[in-house]
Amino acid sequence: MSKGRKIIVSACLAGEKCRYDGKSKANAAIVKLVKEKNAIPVCPEVLGGLPVPRERAEIEAGDGNSVLEGKSRVINFSGDDVTEEYIKGAHEVLKSAQKQNVKRAILKSKNIINRMQVWELPRRF
């Protein structure tokens, strides 16, 4: 990574215990990036106001774009709608990225095969 070019990373991958179950999913390479101050850890769920630990939540139908477009919701396992918190968290991550001129993110993926995904960050939602 070139000096001065930071990325946003999922806080749980950086070793922070912020997952729904109060644990982390530390990844040695991500932890190293954060320690070297080349990455900024963020947890969208926490930034959106959700506690740690918290109930698992899933998108009702579609994907994240469906949620942002108002076509779907994020529902926790008790049936509570937590869409607002997830959208707020996404906006807070984007705001943080814009403030620090970050263009890329490595975020935790729910995909069992690919545990991380690299994203080019949009200018806005």
Image: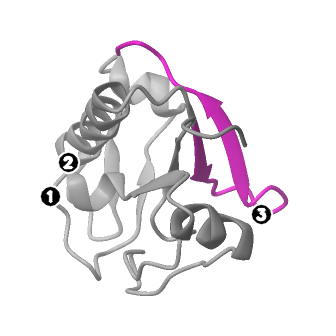
Residue 42 locus on image (x, y percent): 38, 55
Q: Is residue 30 left or right of residue 38?
A: right
Name the N-terminal-most of marks 1 and 2: 1
Residue 90 position by quadrant: top left
- Give the amino acid at mark 1: Gly
Furthest residue toward right: 113
Q: Residues within 10 Å of mark 2 (few under 14, many from 20)?
A: some
Residue under pointer 1: 49
Does residue 116 belong to the magenta stretch?
yes
Q: Amino acid at mark 3?
A: Ile
Disc sitting over residue 112 in the figure: 3
Q: Nearer the viewer, residue 18 or 61?
A: 18
Can you give x and y, in whole percent of width and height, for residue 59 in the image?
45, 45
Quadrant placement of the N terminus:
top right
Q: Secondary structure at mark 3?
A: loop
Query: Circle 2 sits on which residue?
Result: 85
Please state the horizontal and vertical placement of residue 14, each as a whole percent of the image.
53, 70
Mark 1 residue element: loop
Picture residue at 25% right of the left edge, 62% below the top: 46
Q: Which residues are magenta?
A: 105-125
94 up-or-down from 123: above or below: below
Render colour scheme:
one colour
The relative height of residue 96 versus residue 106 in the rendered view (above or below) is above
Q: How far is mark 1 from mark 2, CA to CA?
A: 6 Å
Q: Are marks 1 and 2 in contact (CB under 8 Å)?
A: yes
